[in-house]
Image (cartoon, helix red, strand yellow):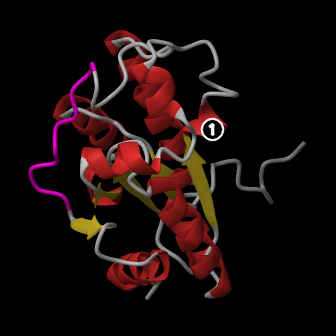
Amino acid sequence: MSDSHCNTTYLTQEEKEKYLRQRARAIWLTGYSGSGKSTIALGLERMLASNGYFTRVLDGDIIRTGINKNLGYSPDDRYENIRRIAEVNKLFIQTGIITINAFISPTHEIRALAKGIIGEPYFTEIYVDARLEECIRRDPKGLYKKAIEGKIKDFTGLDAPYEVPLHPDLVIHTEQLTEEQAVDLLFRFLIPKLKYE
């Protein structure tokens, strides 16, 4: 085969962003279980899609039943969980896709790991803020109940720490906002970063 009429180099991220008419970015929602991360992520995905953006939501339900199904909740497993997720994000970003991540990612170190792998220019940290007491009251998946009963070990907020982000790009107070208000707030914050111009 002659190479005279074909280009055998990979398409660049810039070329893919131009084709998709969007800027790739990893949107990283962190907060307690039950704070509203996945709800906001799914709402944001629908709002972005209705405005012509291509996205991929990643959350614990997706990751821990697939690529990370062999990991538990020990500190080492949590670290490896986030490392793999960040590498997946990096691949999506190189493809021009916007990723919306909903992970507790409880420590400064673990979030710094994700940012380091993904790349600071593409990483937007969103703190989904709700008091632990409120998250326990909501308990949408019954995880706090199981943790309190001793069926889940090393559960964040109970027998494992959560370190509040020091300098998040945006804080969403889900005890003060409706789901629609929270999604709209995040959408309006992100659009200038995602527009291809």
Q: Say whether residue 156 is left or right of residue 36.
A: left
Q: Does the magenta stretch include residue 62?
A: no
What is the three-letter code of the residue carrying label 1?
Asp
Residue where numbered disc 1 is placed: 61
**x and y, in percent, of residue 63 in the image:** 61, 34
Q: Quadrant of residue 79?
A: top left
**x and y, in percent, of residue 115 in the image:** 29, 43
Asked whether the viewer can see residue 159, the reply is yes
The one nearer the camera, 106 or 195, is: 106
Q: Say whether residue 99 is left or right of residue 147.
A: right
Q: Does the magenta stretch include residue 165?
A: yes
- Overall secondary structure of the magenta section: loop
**x and y, in percent, of residue 99 in the image:** 52, 57
Q: In which quarter of the image is residue 49?
A: bottom right
The one nearer the camera, 189 or 96, is: 189
* Number of other residues with Cα within 10 Å of mark 1, as a class: few under 14, some 14 to 19, many 20 or more: few
Residue at image location 70% in from the left, 27% down from the top: 66
Residue at image location 26% in from the left, 52% down from the top: 120
Asked whether the viewer can see residue 84, the reply is no
Q: Label 1's element? A: helix
Quarter placement of the N terminus: top right
User: Where does the magenta region start and end?
Assistant: 159-168
**x and y, in percent, of residue 50 in the image:** 66, 85
Looking at the image, the residue that sits furthest to the right is 1
Residue at image location 55% in from the left, 44% down from the top: 59
- As displayed, is residue 96 above or below residue 141? below
Looking at the image, the residue that sits furthest to the left is 166
Quarter placement of the C terminus: bottom left
Q: How many marks?
A: 1
Residue at image location 22% in from the left, 37% down from the top: 112
